[in-house]
Image (tube, rainbow, N blue to C red):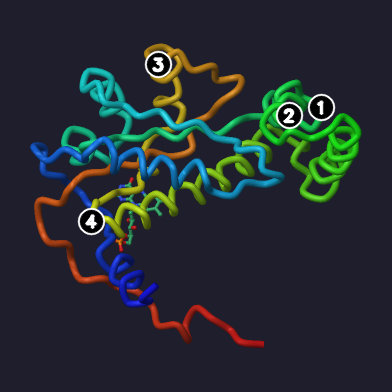
Amino acid sequence: MNKQIILDAFLFRHACKEFDPQAHIPDEDFLFLLETARLSPSSFGFEPWQFLVIQDMELRKKLLPHTWGAQGQIPTASHFVVCLAMKTPLLKYDSPRIADFMRQVQKLPEDGIAARTKYFQTFQESDLRLLDNERAMFDWACKQCYIAMANMMTAAALIGIDSCPIEGFIREKVETVLEKEFDIDLEKYGLAYMLAFGYRLKAPRPKTRQNLDQIVRWL
Ligand SMILES: Cc1cc2nc3c(=O)[nH]c(=O)nc-3n(C[C@H](O)[C@H](O)[C@H](O)COP(=O)(O)O)c2cc1C
């Protein structure tokens, strides 16, 4: 693979503020982006995410009042993703979901499940202290969701699709909307981020970045 093609995609990607409302991403291309999310790595492989693709404009409008960072993107994006991160009831080492996941998705034998559960317990209890509070577990899940975000944005850029990552929202308010209007169980899921996709209307501003020697230390 030509490295310049990849760098060109990184230069093409920018946080697109407004999309061409008439330009629709072909289904096949959007499924390709979702596939890059699906194939993204996660801690222990437990995939602590769910992606809501919000195509209903009436539903999108309900997000708008609490999402100051996407005023131009929500109404114009071809596809609009809300990424939910799992919470403790779905991620704790002894939760039914984790046992089911090891059995049904990872196809582990029963003794493998027992060994991995113990390992996962130590990891959660003492290595990363994810059980100290609900927020620690949620933030750990969010970090993993962001890997899928990056992969989707890079994959999009490689095939000429624009995107914008969005954290400009009032989480509590959006979560209330998600609970009431989208039937999301907030005991189990929280809002990680939003991600808009489409095609740019305007050329982006030139990229600003520090130089490598300002961000890297070789030791
Ligand atoms: C986690 C995250 C959250 C962001 N939230 C928003 C947002 O709410 N609205 C927005 O317009 N841009 C948002 N951005 C875009 C950044 O402002 C943008 O990536 C940064 O200024 C660099 O510009 P570039 O991506 O165009 O190179 C976000 C970026 C990241 C990574």
In contact (CB < 8 Å): disc 3 and disc 2: no
Question: Closer to the camera, 196 or 215?
Answer: 196
How crowded pointer 1 is (Cα within 10 Å; few <14, some 14-19, many 20+) is rated as: some
What residue do we see at 75% from left, 21% from top?
96
- Marks 2/1 in contact by CB < 8 Å: the verdict is yes
Q: Which residue is mark 2?
A: 98
- Label 2 residue near ligand 1, CB within 8 Å: no
Q: Nearer the viewer, mark 1 or mark 4?
A: 4
Sequence order check, earlier mark of 3 and 4: 4
Horizontal side, residue 98 vs residue 143: left or right: right
- Disc 4 or 2, which lies upstream in sequence? 2
Separation of marks 1 and 3 at Cα, in angstroms: 28 Å
Indicate which disc, 3 or 2, sits on the residue closer to the N terminus.
2
Among numbered discs 1 and 3, the one appearing first in the sequence: 1
Looking at the rendered structure, the kind of residue marked 3 is: Phe
For the image, the number of numbered tags is: 4
Residue where numbered disc 4 is placed: 160
CA gap between label 3 and label 2 equals 25 Å
Tag 3 secondary structure: helix
Q: Is residue 170 above or below residue 199?
A: above
Decide which of 123, 25 is in the foreground and name it: 25
* Position in image of residue 173 (x %, y %): 41, 25
Give the Cα distance between marks 4 and 2. Answer: 37 Å
Q: In 3D space, how far apart are the residues under numbered discs 1 and 4 (Cα atoms)? A: 43 Å
- Left or right of 108 on screen, residue 187: left
| Relative image position of residue 94 (x, y in whole percent) | 81, 27
Residue 182: which numbered mark, if any?
3
- Of residues 150 and 178, which is closer to you in this image? 150
Residue at numbered disc 1: 94
Residue 137 versus residue 99 in the image, above or below: below
Residue drawn at 53 percent across, 48 percent down: 40
**What quarter of the picture does the N terminus occupy?**
bottom left
